[in-house]
Image (cartoon, rainbow, N blue to C red):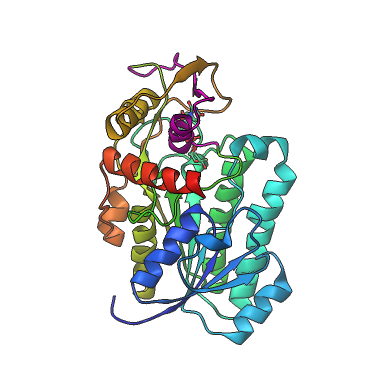
């Protein structure tokens, strides 16, 4: 990319957002982050200017868009826990949908665009086939997935009516960490497989719990498509370029195209770290589909996305490097 652009990154202090900020700075862009620090961490920012505030506050957005001109917005700020979304749908629809509506309206009024939006494989619900391509039916099974699906629908309508162009990127299982070990996954509470399995290696008192080994898969554990967080960040850069070149509002699936079971992840961790994770098998977690694998061909052909870190060993090695840093913090 040749020209320096000015970008607003909403939710830039979170896991994927902070890797995005690093990627944008490395690409020579100017970055402003808006984050309310409700789930993110200010020390995850490797550069850029931080504005602490909520993206659902219209006055905050008016002040930001009046003060500076942006060439694009990246929106990572959402609540992401499926179980919590079932228990507290109002919170999820407020944050993920209503606040995003406020953002989109402000962008239209201030003539700001385009937008890259963080969507999810959860928009598909229980898959009717794998790998999942973009035309697969979207039937979300929980308020989290539904909230992302609703925003995708709003984005189509905002393009048709107001000309706000956007790309929705549907992440499968974001994993790994900054290859240089500076930042990584930091959720509170942590619910994801790879960080929890690695933490069981660092904390002798805890076992890693495998949520069910009676699925209809070769080893009975769930299969997922793990995609390196740095590759996800690159995909956003590709999406911005696509939009700056006049690309139409679209959605793309982002994965590696390979599925790995929970047991295969644990085996890879043993190979990378050199010791086995202590595991116990417990009952299934509600709402886990047996198999989720992305077909990312469209992102590769239309956006020109080429994932660099598609080996599972690399993803686990970077995650392990980060977990050791995090453990010492
Ligand atoms: N798992 C365990 N034990 C754990 C944690 C996870 O066995 O302690 C298993 C899960 O049952 C699942 C797999 O590991 O089979 C991966 O689970 P994660 O929680 O790491 O990820 P999910 O596939 O559940 O979730 C991801 C994203 C969500 C998104 C979803 C899309 O993190 O935001 O994909 O379906 F909604």
Horizontally, residue 35 falls left or right of residue 198, namely right
Q: Residue 185, how many percent across, how many down?
A: 48, 48
216 part of magenta stretch: yes
Residue 104: % across, % down: 60, 68
Left or right for 252, reference 108: left
Residue 294 in view = no
Determine the image quadrant of residue 62. bottom right
Q: Residue at x 67, y 68 (%)?
A: 53
Give me the residue at 39% from left, 62% from top: 236
In the image, taking residue 132 as reference, residue 72 lies left or right, namely right
**Position of 66 relative to 195 (above/below):** below
Q: Which residues are magenta?
A: 191-218
Q: Nearer the viewer, residue 196 or 157?
A: 196
Q: Give 228 or 299, whichever is nearer the viewer.
A: 228
Q: Nearer the viewer, residue 84 or 168?
A: 84
Percent across and percent down for residue 20 are 43, 62
């Amino acid at each position: 990319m040749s020209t320096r652009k000015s970008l607003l990154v909403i939710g830039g202090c979170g896991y994927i957002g902070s890797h995005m900020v690093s990627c944008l700075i490395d690409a020579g862009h100017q970055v402003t982050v808006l984050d309310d620090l409700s789930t993110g961490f200010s020390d995850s920012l490797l550069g850029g200017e931080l504005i602490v505030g909520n993206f659902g506050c219209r006055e905050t957005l008016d002040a930001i868009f009046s003060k500076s001109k942006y060439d694009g917005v990246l929106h990572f700020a959402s609540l992401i826990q499926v179980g919590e979304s079932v228990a507290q749908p109002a919170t999820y629809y407020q944050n993920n949908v209503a606040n995003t509506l406020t953002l989109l309206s402000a962008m239209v009024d201030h003539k700001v665009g385009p937008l890259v939006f963080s969507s999810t494989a959860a928009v598909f619900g229980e898959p009717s086939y794998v790998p999942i391509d973009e035309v697969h039916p979207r039937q979300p099974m929980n308020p989290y997935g539904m909230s992302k699906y609703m925003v995708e629908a709003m984005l189509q309508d905002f393009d048709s009516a107001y000309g706000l162009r956007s790309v929705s990127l549907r992440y499968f299982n974001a994993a790994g960490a900054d290859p240089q070990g500076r930042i990584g996954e930091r959720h509170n509470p942590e619910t994801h497989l790879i960080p929890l399995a690695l933490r069981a290696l660092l904390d002798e008192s805890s076992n890693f719990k495998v949520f069910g080994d009676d699925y209809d898969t070769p080893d009975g554990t769930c299969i997922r498509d793990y995609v390196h967080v740095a590759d996800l960040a690159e995909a956003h850069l590709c999406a911005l370029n696509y939009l700056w070149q006049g690309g139409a509002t679209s959605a793309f699936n982002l994965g590696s195209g390979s599925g790995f079971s929970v047991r295969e992840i644990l085996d890879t961790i043993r190979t990378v770290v050199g010791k086995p994770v202590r595991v116990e098998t417990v009952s299934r977690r509600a709402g886990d589909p047996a198999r989720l694998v992305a077909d990312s061909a469209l992102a590769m052909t239309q956006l020109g996305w080429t994932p660099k870190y598609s080996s599972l060993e690399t993803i686990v090695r970077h995650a392990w490097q980060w977990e050791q840093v995090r453990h010492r913090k």
